């Protein structure tokens, strides 16, 4: 499952990599392993004096990792492509509106996938057998 997001970039002319201006980001659904890896990237083991080791989770880092891993590719207006996933340094080229659009696109893909899974589960139930499969 993929969706396209139009982006303007910080300068208003797309995401610039080299000489190319990418104006479309293709976002894809992550698999379980990629989601786990993004969550793990957001965890840091901290040693606290008197408290020992604690695991600290950063929702910001996890979200950044999810965005980078969700990018299937960038596209120019004339069809040139830059493959994903993105390096986290590329996120600095997105405007705050672009960033919000990418998050919204990921949420839409997740909701669509959850809806499809729910419909599939409901179709597998036999109402004549009390809802059992």
Image: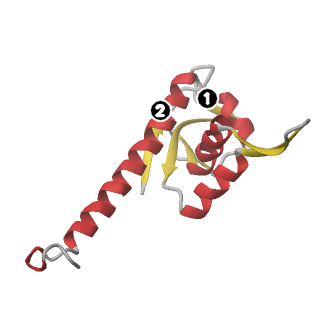
Q: Which residue carries the number 1 mark?
A: 94
Q: Which residue carries the number 2 mark?
A: 101
Report whether 71 appears left or right of 3.
Answer: right
User: Tags 2 and 1 in contact by the CB under 8 Å rule?
Assistant: no
Residue at image point 13% right, 75% down: 130
Q: Measure the alpha-carbon separation of dots 2 and 1.
A: 10 Å
The answer to which of 76 and 111 lies nearer the viewer is 111
Place residue 52 in its image quadrant: top right
Q: Using the rendered image of the protein, determine whether residue 20 is visible from the camera's viewpoint.
A: no
Give percent across and percent down for residue 39. 64, 50
Ranked by sequence position, the earlier of labels 2 and 1 is 1
Q: Which residue of the protein is positioned furthest toward the top in this rendering? A: 11
Q: Using the rendered image of the protein, determine whether residue 22 is visible from the camera's viewpoint.
A: yes
Residue at image point 60% right, 40% down: 63
Whether residue 21 is situated above or below residue 53 in the rendered picture: above
Give percent across and percent down for residue 129. 12, 80
SS under mark 2: helix
Report whether 108 appears left or right of 19.
Answer: left
Please tell me how crowded label 2 is: few (under 14), some (14-19), or many (20+) other residues with Cα within 10 Å.
Answer: some
């Amino acid at each position: 499952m993929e969706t396209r997001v139009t982006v303007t970039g910080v300068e208003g002319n797309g995401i610039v990599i080299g000489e190319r201006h990418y104006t479309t980001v293709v976002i894809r659904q992550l698999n379980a392993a990629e989601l786990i890896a993004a969550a793990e990237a957001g965890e840091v083991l901290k040693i606290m004096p008197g408290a020992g080791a604690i695991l600290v989770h950063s929702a910001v880092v996890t979200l950044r990792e999810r965005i980078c891993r969700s990018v299937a590719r960038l596209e120019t207006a004339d069809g040139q492509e830059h493959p994903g996933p993105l390096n986290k340094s590329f996120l600095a080229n997105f405007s705050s509106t672009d960033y919000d659009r990418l998050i919204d696109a990921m949420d839409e893909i997740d909701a669509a996938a959850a809806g499809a899974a729910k419909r599939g589960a409901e179709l597998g139930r036999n109402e004549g057998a009390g809802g059992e499969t």
